[in-house]
Image (spheres, rainbow, N blue to C red):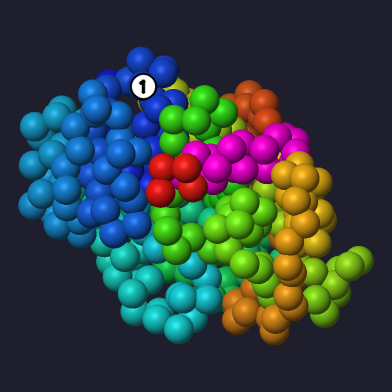
Amino acid sequence: MSVLVTGGAGYIGSHATLALLGAGYEVVVIDNLSTGVREAVSTNVPLIMGDVGDGELTGKIIREHNVEAIMHFAGSIVVPESVENPLKYYLNNTANSRTLIQSAVENGVKTFIFSSTAAVYGMPDKIPVTEDAPTIPINPYGTSKLMTEWMLKDTIAAHDLTAGVLRYFNVAGADPQGRVGQSTPRATHLIKVACQTAIGARDKIQIFGDDFPTPDGTGIRDYIHVCDLVDAHVELLKYLTSERQSVTMNCGYGTGYSVKQVLDTVQRVSGKTFNIETAPRRAGDPPIIVADPTRIGETLGWKPKHADLDFIVRTALDWEKRLHTMA
């Protein structure tokens, strides 16, 4: 089976490409390299420079590479930026996704996996949050992703398309073999920024808000290792192609850590102390969000291998050291 990976030169997409290759799939990547890096794509994988919003191009790729499934990672992911520049997010995450879905339908693709987010839940009343919780996003990033979920729901009702939606919680870490990692220069992921600070690539790190209604006042998140996340994608692909049943599932561990706990872990694992400053809360940040991963476990038989914060930090730290050496 040939799989088109959009955003395959990015953080999660590059890990997914390796996981797909390891599982015996043929892979083709489309990426505009706005945040991805060419070196993250395996040399034996075709990389087409372009935008998923270019329907003529995606249709041509699907036909020429006999694409049977699409894993859609391409998009914009920075919550505060989405508040400042919502139209960018409705273009990259919603309008472009609509064009890609249309290309899939018009060219006979039967399977579509969409990279969604826990941000669709907004500020859930109950923790851990299940897939049946109300979807009331509090920022344009979450709304732009939810709108694509809606489009997929309507499309699979009208066409011969099966879709899997995975709502990511906080993805972190890097390939333990050091092949790929989070390479985006301006990435805002907490663990990446903390690791950069630990190795001296940044002079400080900021905690955005220490007055949340949580035990230590900082936001609590469910951190999932990127390799566990992409393994879930491969298992979902197998499920969709065999069962032909569309599904929506959380991708998290069901354990939450506060910002302060994460920073303490990075300092302990790295053996370095670093400058931490407190800043005001960022717009669109909920105080706590943790997954209920029951559905994905029961549906796919998915069992995470790296559900350990120390391991997540260690692989992220190793990757940052590698990038710093190469710079």
Q: What percent of the width, then of the height, locates residue 233? A: 48, 34
Residue at left offset 72%, top offset 57%: 221
Viewer-proximal residue, 113 or 288? Answer: 288
Of 272 and 87, nearer the camera is: 272
Residue drawn at 68 percent across, 72 percent down: 206
Residue 183 locus on image (x, y percent): 43, 49
Magenta residue span:
307-323
Would residue 237 be counted in the magenta stretch? no
The picture places residue 150, in percent across and down from the top left corner, at: 42, 60
Q: How crowded is mark 1: few (under 14 residues within 10 Å), some or many (20 or more)?
A: some
Q: Does the magenta stretch include residue 314?
A: yes
| Residue beneath disc 1 | 21
- In this image, 257 relative to 31: left or right? right
Magenta-drawn stretch, dominant element (helix, strand or loop):
helix
Could you tell me which quadrant the N terminus lies in?
Answer: top left
> Total label count?
1
Disc 1 secondary structure class: helix
